[in-house]
Amino acid sequence: MIYADNAATTKMSRAAIEAMKECMEEDYGNPSSLHSVGQRAQEKLSEAREKIASLLGCLPAEIIFTSGGSEADNQALRSAAALGAKKGKKHLVSTAFEHHAVLHTLKKLESEGYEVTLVPVGEDGLVSPAEVERAIRPDTCLVSVMYANNEIGTIQPIPEIAALCKRKGVLFHTDAVQAAGHIPVSLENVDMLSLSAHKFHGPKGIGLLYARRGLRPDPLIEGGAPARGKRAGTENLPAIMGMAAALEESVLHMKENAEKMSAVRDRVIAGLSRIPHGILNGDAKKRLPGCVSFCFEGIEGESLLLMLDDYGICASSGSACTSGSLDPSHVLLAIGRPHEIAHGSLRLTFSEETTLEDADEVVTKVKEVVEKLRGMSPVWRELQEGKRQYFLR
Ligand SMILES: *Cc1c(COP(=O)(O)O)cnc(C)c1O
């Protein structure tokens, strides 16, 4: 079996599992307890916080542990909106191809009286800083642009966008869930940043919101002692330990892993580009090391996935959230793919464990499955008989 769905989630690393195991067996105390067992847990928590902070290049106090990327996104948007409302600023800027954790929160905020501008995305899967600048108004309280897209893997010009927001005096948040642990992530001029452990070989259900010193994001979860606006509830210490171990390992091996994964990625892109009437989604170079996304004309992404699974390849049609619904991906529509093409999407996301042999096998099997499915497709027959026009050359 070849696992090529690392953007949906990754396999936990040995180091993360060991860190969690040790914590569960030995540091079972509640960090808020005053006795020695609790204080030991509190020490472990502080150590993990310090380690993560030094890996990210921020202060320990700037980290809020959350239940994952979705919660961090929700908290960032809601806090900025609440802060904006106090100053009469009720406009938020984001992009058309954000993760649903951002887009659905923005929808909610709209229904609560906020205004939202979604900046369009280029056909290359890149957001233009000039477009973001144009969308900013005097009443804008937040700009939120993802670091790297989770469906097509394109890396956004975050340093430029963060700098222009700073210049304009607008808060800037970035969903860095796909980027953290995979590519260098800069916090320069960034006010808030979300990440999630299970996207870099850590456990599921844990993530964090970085919030620049001075910002005090409103907690989404209330309860317990009202300490410094911190998230209520007993900290998930084993998961936090697992996240710290996974992040350390990912950051330490980032360069070599990225080189390995880019080689696999580029080999798969080269191989799949030879399939007629198909197209790579997003810029070929400005993309995550392990991410390949294609659309193939005349097939259904769902059937492609199921058949690939039979062939021993775990892939995705786009985001895990869109998979399983028949709506085409909002990301592919945002980069201008017509519905007919967006339905035939395939996302392959590799890890440092994927080999070049795996890459060749993936290419061979995808080719075979695409041919097979086209052979059974009435749409494909009409295209071939000239009764329909091809979208893709
Ligand atoms: C996975 C993902 C999320 C959600 O993270 P969870 O920890 O699963 O809640 C948010 N944004 C992006 C870009 C993602 O890829």
Image (cartoon, rainbow, N blue to C red):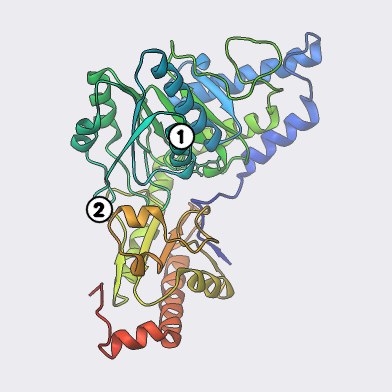
Q: Quadrant of residue 393?
A: bottom left
Residue at 27% across / 82% down in the picture?
A: 388
How many circles with numbers are drawn on the protein?
2
Q: Position of residue 287 (x, y in %)?
A: 32, 49
The amino acid beneath tag 1 is Ser
Tell me if mark 1 has few (under 14), some (14-19) or many (20+) residues whose alpha carbon lies within 10 angstroms of its own: few
- Which is more N-terminal, label 2 or label 1? 1
Where is 199 relative to 392, above or below?
above
Residue 23 as seen in the image, left or right of residue 370? right
The answer to whether the residue bearing label 2 lies less than 8 angstroms from the nearest atom of ligand 1 is no
Q: Position of residue 86 (x, y in %)?
A: 41, 13
Residue 313 as seen in the image, left or right of residue 281? right
- SS category of the residue bearing label 1: helix
Q: Quadrant of residue 15?
A: top right
Residue at mark 1: 111
Q: Position of residue 335 (x, y in %)?
A: 29, 54
Residue at 69% across / 38% down in the picture?
A: 18
User: In the image shown, does 267 or 136 lie closer to the viewer?
Assistant: 136
User: In the image shown, does 243 or 372 lie closer to the viewer?
Assistant: 372
Mark number, residue 124: 2
- SS category of the residue bearing label 2: loop
C-alpha separation, residue under disc 1 versus residue under disc 2: 31 Å
Image quarter hosting the N terminus: bottom right
